[in-house]
Image (spheres, rainbow, N blue to C red):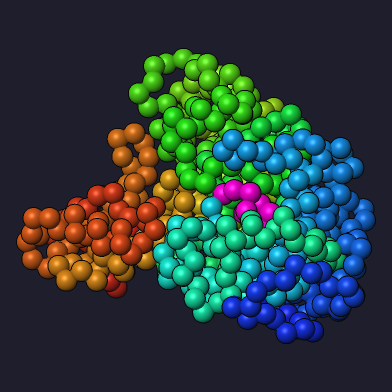
Amino acid sequence: MTTPRPTATPQLAAPQPTTPRPTATAQPTTTARATTVPQPRAALDGSVSVSVPVSVSGSVSGSGSGAPGNLAAYLDDLAERRGWGGRVAFHQGHQGWTHGEVHALAAQAAGVLAGHGVRPGDRVLLALPDGIAWVTAFLGIARLGAVAVLVNPELPAAEHAFMAEDTGAVLCLTGPGLEDRFAERARLGADQFLALAPTAVPAPAHPVDADAPLYVQYTSGTTGRPKGVVHTHGDPKAYHDLIGRRLLGITEDDVTLSVSKLYFAYGFGNAFVFPLFSGSSAVLVDRRPTPAAVDELVARHRVTLLYSVPSAFAALVADRGSGHAACFASVRAAVSAGEGMPDELGQRVGELLGAPVLEQIGSTEAGHAFCANSLGHNRPGTVGRPVPGFEVEVRDRAGRPVSDGEEGELWVRGPTVTAGYLNRPEETERTLVGGWLATHDRARREPDGAYRHLGRTDDMEMVGGITVSPLEVEAVLRAHPAVREVAVAAVTDGRGFSRLRAFVVPVSSPADGLSDDLVALARDRLAAFKVPRSVSFVPSLPRTSTGKLRRHLVRQGAW
């Protein structure tokens, strides 16, 4: 039985620095403060807790009994105690950084951030691709007791602006080409950040409790506006202990490659949390790797754990003969999440890799997986059993648990389920009830205790392992003068994968090229994964007597 967190709407408290912040144009200083300065800690309920002094020695109190306290300081100490300092933690391109180097750079990164005015409780937006800058920036933010805002750097400017405003970010760390997106806020490019870090004076770790806010990740909202999910300094240790160590048996000899990126919950656990807590290493790639790149990276680094989504696994096996490929000889397990894995594909992936394929399901709200297959118990075609420490129920529309074999909605509670959405009290109240999270996933429980995922219950679509709001896409397409009505849904293609399709009721007979024009309009205004792959023109859309769209019929193409 788990002890649920109190349900609340997080209001990240505004810090009250005792010294003026540098302005956006101020030059960074890398000189550490020489005195002990009280700083407030942001609490999940929006209050500011009792000020805790920043120790110039960098020591962190309140982390006994295995509780992590400040995550960055805990990981630094863990690597030293376990003797991992000389082991490679991250590979990028043809370079590698040891655990010792990563934590030393993180302390210097904290010095750079402090020089740019970042204080405990502040929010710092990370719009960076996967790489050593992302890793050291996140750890530097954690070290200061600040809160990292993890965003996909490929999102449109409007979404970045919303996330910066929603969190009140005081500094934005930006990847290539994004430097001008946050003109009204203090910002720092990745190249400048990496250039400053090696000469910066390391900043001391700020003492925090394990339940202090650590990072915010965004998940799509039903209105198209993303929702900020708050996780704590204690959550990553739980991801590792319950999933990485217990279910996957990760050791310091493992090498990870994750197609899912660090700014997603799945990739954050796979390629950041698990390596740092286990002394193992991860291969970081700034873009989604092609199948040829996966082959090369796995062979070069002797990858043992390959994390991906079914659509990427499908690309990996495409145009290959049956049987095992020698380049994957080092792989001991593949992990799949984000969308359902067709049975035939799972079998082909297993044959190609010569390793078991373990499906799991999780969410941004849960932080990582809450149901998973393991090396000791793998049920292909299901997402496995509840992760130890989690409770999972399938409920009907009235919220009552159903019997095995009956379909319903997955409800979850466990040690890492968020306390609520940032600044969204109504959505928090609807989604989190008595510590239980309504996942909006349809499922049924098999007699052996494994769960079979059956799709989504709400107006969200899952495409390529990423949740997309069709309402947001529809709003863009509806702006075209030739569109009377539009509905967007994920439909299954010939290979069994979900692809976005726009069903359009045109104002008049559609002109030649209208399909291309609509796709181009979406591509101009939306992130790539939100762009429909195809457009179908229809005379009408299925609606209820009150005019509400019957989206389930749109998905089926049956009306």
Quarter of the image where the C terminus is located: bottom left
Residue 239 forms part of the magenta stretch = no
Residue 369 in view in this figure = yes
Vertical comparison of 408 with 405: above or below: below
Residue at 77 percent of width and 35 percent of height? 87
- Coordinates of residue 145 in the picture (x, y in percent): 77, 67
Residue at 93 percent of width and 56 percent of height? 64
What secondary structure predominates along the stretch shown in magenta? helix
Residue 416, quarter of picture: bottom right
Vertical comparison of 217 with 251: above or below: below
Q: Nearer the viewer, residue 452 or 325?
A: 325
What's the magenta region? Answer: 130-140
Residue at 63 percent of width and 68 percent of height? 124
* 211 displayed left or right of 173: right
* 73 displayed left or right of 46: right
Residue 552 in view in this figure = no
- Coordinates of residue 287 in the picture (x, y in percent): 48, 45
- Coordinates of residue 29 in the picture (x, y in percent): 72, 71
- Coordinates of residue 3 in the picture (x, y in percent): 78, 58
* 315 displayed left or right of 9: left
Residue 291, quarter of picture: top left
* 277 displayed left or right of 190: right
Vertical comparison of 512 with 352: above or below: below
